[in-house]
Amino acid sequence: MRTHGDGASRSSYTAAGVRRAPILAVLSAAALCGCRGGSEPPAVFTISTPYAIGTLEPGVWNRQSDFALLSNLYEPLLVNDADLSPLPCLAERWRNPDALTWVFDLREGVRFHDGRPLTAEDVVWSVERLRTDPRLEASVYAASIRSARALDVRTVEIRTEAPSAILLNKLRFVMVVPKGASPAELAERPVGTGPYRLEAYRPGAEMRFVRNEDYWGRRPDLPVVSILLNRSAKEALDDFVSKRSDFVQSDSRESEAVLRDLAGVETRRHSSVAVKFLTLDVARAKTPGVDAARNPFVDVRVRRAVSMAVDRAELVRRLEVPAVPAHQVVTPFIFGFDPALPPTRPDPEGARRLLAEAGWPNGFAVTLHARALFAEAASVVAEMLGRAGIRVAVRTLTEREYFEAIEGGRATMTLTRFGCPTGDASNMLENALHTRQEASHLGKNNYPGYSDAELDRLVEEADRIPEMSRRRLVLSKAIGIAMRDLPWVPLYVDETFYAFRSGISWQPRNDDFLIAADIRRAP
C-alpha cells in the first residue's frame, strides 16, 4: 500500500507494534481548554473537528467520524498500521488452521474501564452483537462470520461462511464491549479497553477523554484530551491563532496559508482515504427531490449525463479545499482500483443530448442535500449541472440532519463521501453498491437503492479469493460495473492539512485516523 502526503514516516505505533485508539481531529475552540503555547503539551490537549457522532454506542453507524472518535475508548482484536495492514491489538497472535477457521489468542492483563478483565466471552459477545443486531451498520464487517466461540478464557475461534480474504482487515472495525452490555448502557456510559476513558460528553459540542491509567499498552503522553465537535475551518483557525487550541486538521487553503507562516508550528498534508460523491436515487419510480411525476435517475443515461456535466478539474481549482479529481469509486492507493479505466471527460453539450434522449429535453429541477462539510462543492456542482439543463437547489444540512434525511428516504440527490479504511475496495463495494440484504448485512450504506446481479456476484466472489492478483481483477471488474451504472458519481478526493504546535511528534495515516495516544512529546 502506497503512502501519500509529505513523505514522512507514517508509523504511529508502539515498539510492540500495537496501534492506539484513533480520533479524527482538527483544532480546538473551547473556552474550557486552557491551552497555551510552549514546548510541552498542555495539561488539557485540545483538538477541534468538523465531525460529530450520532451515539456513544459503537457500531450503530458505519461512519468515519464515529469510528475515529469512539476508537479512543474501544479496541478491536486487530488494528491496521499506517499503510492499512493488520497488526495485533487485543489479540496478540492468531492462526488460520483451515480456510474457514481463525483462532485468536488474547493478551493477558487487559481490563475494561470499570475494572473487569477482558475474556474470550467478551469478544464472542461483541462479534455476535454485530451479527445479530439489525440496527448496527457496522454489522457489514461481521457479515462473512458464521460463528464465534470461546475455546478458553483467552482463546477465541471465529468461523466464516466461506474463505474470507480480508477478515483480519474487517475485524479492525469490530469494537470489543463487555459481555452483556445493552444498547442503553453503551449509549450512556462507554466501557472499553482503550487508552482513554470518557470523562464528559456534550452532544454536538465536545467529548473529553482522560487517560486510562490502567491501560495494558504504552501509556499515552496526553493526560486529558478535549475534542470539540462540529467546528468549521474558520472557527478552528481562529482558535489555533488565538492559542486556545493545540492541533488543527483543516480542509481550507486559506487556513493552510496562515498556519504555515506561524512560528513554532509544524504542518503535515495527507490525501484523504474518502472519495466525495454525488449519490442518486436509482430505485424509486417517484422520488421526493424532483419536480416531476417520475424519477429521472432511474435511467442510466441521466446518471451518465450528471457525470459528464461535472468538470472535475475546474471543480478542484475552484474549491477552497486542496483536492484532486476522482474518476473511480475508490482512491488510487486502494486495492482494486483499476488504472485502465479512462477518466470522465467534461461534456455539458453531450450531457444535454443524453438528457434529451432519456426524455428530458428541457431538463428538470432537483434538490441536492449536502452535508455542511461540502457546501462549497455542492454550490459549484449545482452550477455545472445547470449548464447541462439540470436545475439544482442546494440544501445544506448538519451531520445529524443529513443522516436523518437519507435514513428517512427524504433525499434524491446527495453530496457526501465514502472511504475504504480497510485499504480494500470491498469496503465500498460490499457496503454501498451491493444489493441491500438484511440477512447478510450487505448493502447497509446502499442509499441509492442500486442493484446489479453481476456486481453482487463479483463482490461475493472476491471475498473468497486468497490469490491477490486474481482478487484484484475481480474487484476491478466490479468497479467497472459501478462506473458504468453510476449510482454513486465520484467527484474529488481532498487533501487534509494538519498543523500543531512544536513540542509534539505525530504523523498522518492513510486511513485518515488521528490517534490521540500517538500524539507524543517530541524527543
Image (tube, rainbow, N blue to C red):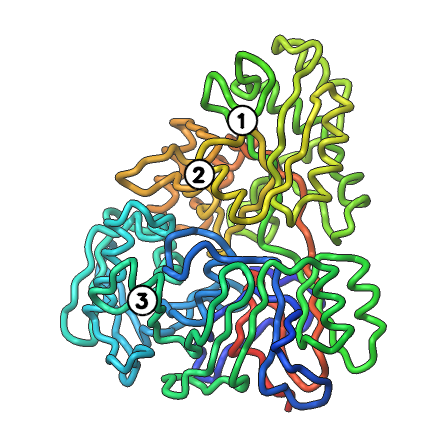
* Residue at 63 percent of width and 86 percent of height: 41
Identify the element where label 2 is drawn.
Answer: helix
| Mark 1 / mark 3, whichever is N-terminal | 3
Q: Is residue 67 left or right of residue 243?
A: left
In the rendered structure, find residue 443 and report the number of the disc placed on it. none
Horizontal and vertical percent position of residue 182: 25, 60
Horizontal and vertical percent position of residue 61: 42, 51
- At label 2, counting other C-alpha atoms closer than 10 Å, the crowd grade (few under 14, some 14-19, many 20 or more) is few
Horizontal and vertical percent position of residue 332: 61, 49
- At label 1, counting other C-alpha atoms closer than 10 Å, the crowd grade (few under 14, some 14-19, many 20 or more) is some
Q: Name the front one of labels 1 and 3.
A: 3
Could you tell me how far apart the alpha carbons at marks 2 and 3 are, in whole angstroms? 26 Å
Residue type at numbered disc 1: Asp
| Mark 1 / mark 2, whichever is N-terminal | 2
Residue linked to disc 1: 485
Q: Name the front one of labels 2 and 3.
A: 2
* Residue at 81 percent of width and 44 percent of height: 318
| Mark 2 / mark 3, whichever is N-terminal | 3
In the rendered structure, find residue 176 and report the number of the disc placed on it. 3
Q: Quick check: can you spot residue 474?
A: no
* Residue at 33 percent of width and 74 percent of height: 90
Q: Quick check: can you spot residue 75?
A: yes
Residue linked to disc 2: 407
Near-viewer residue (289 or 82): 289
* Residue at 21 percent of width and 71 percent of height: 120
Q: Is residue 277 left or right of residue 446?
A: right
Residue type at numbered disc 3: Val
Q: Name the front one of labels 1 and 2.
A: 2
Near-viewer residue (470 or 156): 156
- At label 3, counting other C-alpha atoms closer than 10 Å, the crowd grade (few under 14, some 14-19, many 20 or more) is many
